[in-house]
Amino acid sequence: ERCDILAYEGAPFDVILAHSFLNQFPPAGKRALLAGWRRLLRPGGHVLTSTRLRPGFDPSVRRVRSPSEIAAFVDKARVAAQAQGYAPQALRTLLPRVQTFAERQGGWSLTDTHALRALFSEAGFAVVDLRSGAVAGDRAAFGTADAVSTRVQVVAKAV
């Protein structure tokens, strides 16, 4: 059963945990999502989340993978699966799924920690902790230089 977090009506939560979720929404959707999280948290409750920042990307435009990035990703998956001893039949099943996954990857990127802090603040949160670091191997995951990003972990308290 699917649940729309923005439509959920339930008792307040102490914690909301979300991994790599914010960039699945366009800018207005991000604001609605955080407002929904704020509504669902009890006063003093926390959001723990991680997301990627992609400096240089336009946050109003959905980022999708190019055909060459998708092909590089599928090729890396094929090489890794063969190294693990996957049988040819398993590869025929696996690789189309890897391709579909890569084609669906994308989102509306946040570009820096200031924008991320502002997003939480506008929704009624105080950022308690924010840690960031380069994503190891991110450049190589899709085989292109423009895939570089920073992973950010956020702890925010409902105020």
Image (spheres, rainbow, N blue to C red):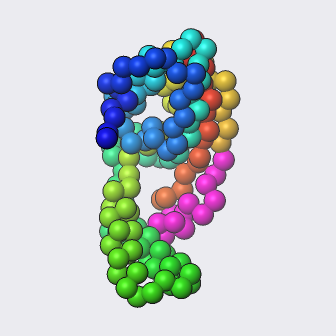
Q: Residue at x 40, y 81 (%)?
A: 90
Q: Is residue 3 above or below residue 68?
A: above
Q: Could you say which is closer to the camera, residue 62 or residue 89? A: 89
Q: Is residue 120 above or below residue 153?
A: above
Q: Residue at x 45, y 41 (%)?
A: 21
Q: Could you say which is closer to the camera, residue 70 or residue 92? A: 92
Q: Could you say which is closer to the camera, residue 99 or residue 4? A: 4
Is residue 136 visible from the viewing direction of this image? Answer: yes
The magenta region covers 133-145
Q: Position of residue 155 (x, y in %)?
A: 62, 29
Q: Is residue 130 above or below residue 158?
A: below
Q: Would you say 147 lies left or right of 48 here? A: left
Q: Would you say 108 lies left or right of 80 here? A: left
The quadrant in which the C terminus is found is top right
Q: Residue at x 58, y 21 (%)?
A: 14
Based on the picture, tell me whether residue 135 belongs to the magenta stretch. yes
Quadrant location of residue 47? top right
Q: Position of residue 78 (x, y in %)?
A: 45, 79
Q: Position of residue 40 (x, y in %)?
A: 46, 19
Q: Position of residue 132 (x, y in %)?
A: 65, 42
Q: Is residue 37 above or below residue 150?
A: above
Is residue 123 visible from the viewing direction of this image? Answer: no
